[in-house]
């Protein structure tokens, strides 16, 4: 069984098109430190702690370590400049996407072998049934000869049917792969989702290979078991849910082990080795968390997701063991210096620490409608297509389902069903969650093809084409919208407003002009865009989240806040660039008046990143502002004058 020429060309074109889209996406966002890079900052801080040997800071029950170590290592080895660091991370994501593509091709190869096994098994069963009929027939020899002749003449046709069906599966799953990894996953996120998906695909393929080698008694079963355990451990270190994914893959082989003795030893080996590999990390993060855990992500996430109404950062409740400290009210000033020193922003580096003690309280009147909304979103994004293809397989009679279809495809659908079910029931999927689906969609769609015991006949192929065409059309529209949306970021970024411009890359040089050095403490006015602090290697130790309330204070009240921050050894107060896409409960007109801020010593930057005094109203180039609170030793600095930028 092999791909037809047209299918080989189509599959290659789809995968190459996916790479180009991934590259376009990475380049489009290569100078933009958008909201989601708050995760990236924590991953980089965590990876850097590992590379520096600061294991007390590195051990973190919330952030999985592998992606952070990888990206921090790439930045260290490349010695990327401030301007190039974000591009370097985005291109690292593209490389991870290429690894994901390779893992998909590996999985596709194992799916092909499994499909061939289905067809051979079906043919053997048909031959047995035919032989039984011939024995009981008085003219069996004549009919048997005729039957053999028909079988010989139809051999070529049957092979063609199999090639066509495999080709359809390969092309269709390639579209599903591109859709789930780019229209939903995306390389713009500074998160480990694509890396975890690559390891998930590889683990799934190794599971299918382990089953195949064990059943046939072929060499390499034990080596495959060891590789499966190793990949499963790496998957867990990239993203915590992949630990459950790996154990579910092994659980899916248990029915095989019960019926096939030769499967038992490799399966037990994979289970034992995987457990040995992950146990030390589980032990150290459990000790850090103060309770047994393999991850505190979901436990903490529900504090603001579904079960308890709390803000994501600086939540307040009597149950909190040690929340961030409230330094002042009206507006609230939160302080957290001394906690997790060496990190850019401690509240988002260790959410499990700040949210310790928060109970899980289900508010059913909000939870049930949200689950219903999640189910509807599933239907829109992929469930509708899955239903169409499933009904085609069941009712078209072109590809009768095997009696053992559920058991045979268990390694594909069991982890996907558990993963997608958990996401639907336990997460608010309306909040930046499409990237969670990537490891599940290809396996669950592949189940429909692998459940078939024989391919459709030539005259029935149009039924499958009619079923797959609208799904592929939907995918192409989504991909076109994604690619078209990135194009303005590449060609006309300045016309999109400050929220989409690379102002964060200019801020470190401006802060350097003020005399701030790596390791200095700053406070932030706003709490959404602080990638500049990571680039400048500054430590944020205080937050004033309500910008509007801050600028409505009297001058004396603001001076009192400045004094409190100075007592914390804060060198500067930075108002982050205004980003209208983030719900800050404020409007652009709520920002500081030019005269008020200038009189208090606030400064901004021009289009080239040079520090300048605030210009007259209507001529302000950036909503970023900074106020120096403590002088550093600087060889030369002229107050209020423009200086050349230094990095």
Image (cartoon, rainbow, N blue to C red):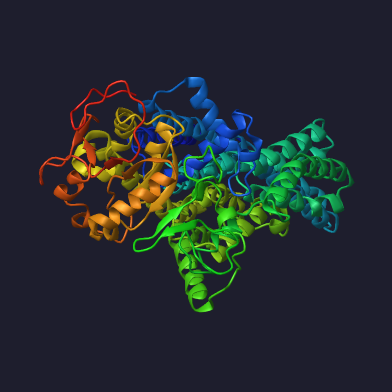
Q: In the visual, does 490 lie left or right of 115?
A: left
Work out which residue is located at the far right of the displayed protein and give it: 261
Q: Position of residue 331 (x, y in %)?
A: 34, 61
Q: Position of residue 310 (x, y in %)?
A: 48, 65
Question: In front here: 413 or 576?
Answer: 576
Work out which residue is located at the far bottom of the displayed protein and give it: 365
Q: In the visual, does 393 lie left or right of 130?
A: left
Q: Can you say which quadrant of the picture contains the C terminus?
A: top left
Image: 311 above or below 180: below
Q: Position of residue 592 (x, y in %)?
A: 21, 52
The residue positioned 84% from the left and 50% from the top of the image is: 257
Image: 438 above or below 643: below
The residue positioned 75% from the left and 48% from the top of the image is: 250
Question: In front here: 426 or 22?
Answer: 426
Q: Can you say which quadrant of the picture contains the N terminus?
A: top right
Q: In the visual, does 352 lie left or right of 178?
A: right
The answer to whether residue 635 is visible is yes
Q: Position of residue 544 (x, y in %)?
A: 37, 54
Question: In front here: 625 or 349?
Answer: 625
The answer to whether residue 451 is visible is no
Q: Quadrant of residue 568?
A: top left
Number of on-image labels: 0
Question: In front here: 84 or 339?
Answer: 339
Image: 243 above or below 360: above
């Amino acid at each position: 069984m092999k791909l037809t020429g047209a299918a080989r060309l189509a599959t290659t074109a789809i995968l190459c098109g996916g790479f180009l889209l991934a590259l376009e996406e990475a380049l489009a966002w290569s100078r933009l430190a958008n909201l989601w890079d708050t995760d990236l900052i924590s991953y980089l801080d965590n990876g850097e702690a590992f590379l520096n040997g600061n294991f007390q800071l590195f051990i973190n029950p919330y952030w999985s370590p592998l992606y952070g170590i990888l990206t921090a290592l790439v930045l260290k080895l490349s010695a990327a400049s401030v301007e190039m660091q974000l591009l370097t991370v985005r291109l690292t994501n593209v490389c991870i996407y290429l690894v994901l593509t390779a893992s998909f091709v590996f999985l596709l190869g194992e799916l092909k072998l499994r499909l061939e096994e289905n067809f051979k098994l079906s043919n053997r069963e048909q031959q047995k049934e035919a032989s039984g009929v011939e024995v009981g027939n008085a003219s069996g020899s004549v009919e048997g000869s005729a039957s053999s002749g028909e079988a010989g003449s139809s051999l070529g046709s049957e092979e063609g049917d199999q090639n066509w069906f495999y080709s359809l599966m390969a092309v269709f799953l390639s579209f599903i792969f591109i859709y789930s990894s780019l229209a939903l996953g995306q390389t713009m996120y500074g998160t480990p989702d694509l890396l975890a998906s690559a390891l998930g695909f590889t683990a799934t393929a190794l599971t299918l290979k382990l089953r195949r080698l064990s059943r046939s008694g072929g060499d390499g079963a034990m080596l495959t078991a060891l590789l499966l355990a190793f990949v499963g451990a790496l998957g867990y270190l990239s993203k915590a849910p992949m630990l459950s994914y790996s154990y579910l893959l092994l659980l899916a082989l248990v029915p095989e082990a019960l019926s096939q003795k030769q499967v038992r030893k490799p399966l037990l080996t994979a289970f034992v080795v995987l457990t040995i590999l992950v146990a030390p990390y589980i032990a150290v993060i459990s000790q850090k968390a103060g309770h047994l855990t393999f991850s505190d992500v979901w436990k903490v996430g529900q504090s603001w997701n579904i079960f308890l109404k709390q803000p994501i950062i600086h939540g307040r409740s009597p149950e909190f063991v040690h929340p961030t400290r409230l330094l002042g009210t009206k507006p609230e000033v939160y302080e957290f210096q001394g906690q997790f020193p060496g990190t850019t922003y401690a509240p988002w580096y260790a959410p499990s620490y700040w949210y310790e003690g928060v109970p899980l309280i289900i508010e059913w009147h909000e939870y049930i409608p949200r689950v219903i909304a999640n189910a509807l979103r599933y239907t829109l994004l992929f469930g509708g297509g899955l239903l169409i293809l499933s009904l085609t397989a069941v009712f078209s009679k072109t590809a009768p389902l095997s009696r053992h279809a559920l058991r045979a495809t268990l390694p594909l659908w069991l982890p996907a069903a558990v993963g997608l079910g958990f996401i639907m029931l336990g997460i608010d999927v309306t909040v930046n969650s499409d990237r969670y689906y990537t490891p599940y969609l290809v396996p669950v769609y592949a189940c429909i093809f692998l459940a078939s015991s024989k391919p459709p006949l030539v005259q029935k192929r149009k039924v499958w084409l009619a079923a797959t065409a609208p799904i592929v059309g939907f995918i192409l529209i989504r991909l076109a919208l994604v690619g078209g949306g990135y194009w303005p970021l590449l060609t006309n970024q300045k016309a999109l407003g400050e929220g989409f411009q690379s102002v964060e890359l200019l801020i470190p040089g401006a802060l350097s002009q003020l005399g701030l050095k790596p390791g200095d403490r700053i406070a932030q006015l706003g709490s959404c865009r602080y990638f500049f602090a990571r680039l400048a290697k500054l430590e944020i130790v205080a937050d004033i989240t309500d910008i509007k309330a801050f600028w409505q204070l009297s001058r004396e009240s603001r001076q009192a806040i400045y004094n409190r921050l100075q007592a914390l050894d804060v060198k500067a107060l930075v108002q982050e660039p205004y980003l209208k896409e983030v719900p800050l409960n404020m409007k652009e007109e709520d920002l500081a008046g030019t005269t008020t801020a200038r009189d208090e010593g606030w400064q901004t930057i021009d289009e080239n990143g040079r520090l300048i005094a605030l210009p007259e109203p209507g001529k302000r180039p950036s909503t970023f502002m900074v106020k120096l609170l403590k002088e550093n030793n600087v060889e030369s600095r002229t107050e209020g004058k423009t200086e050349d930028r230094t990095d």
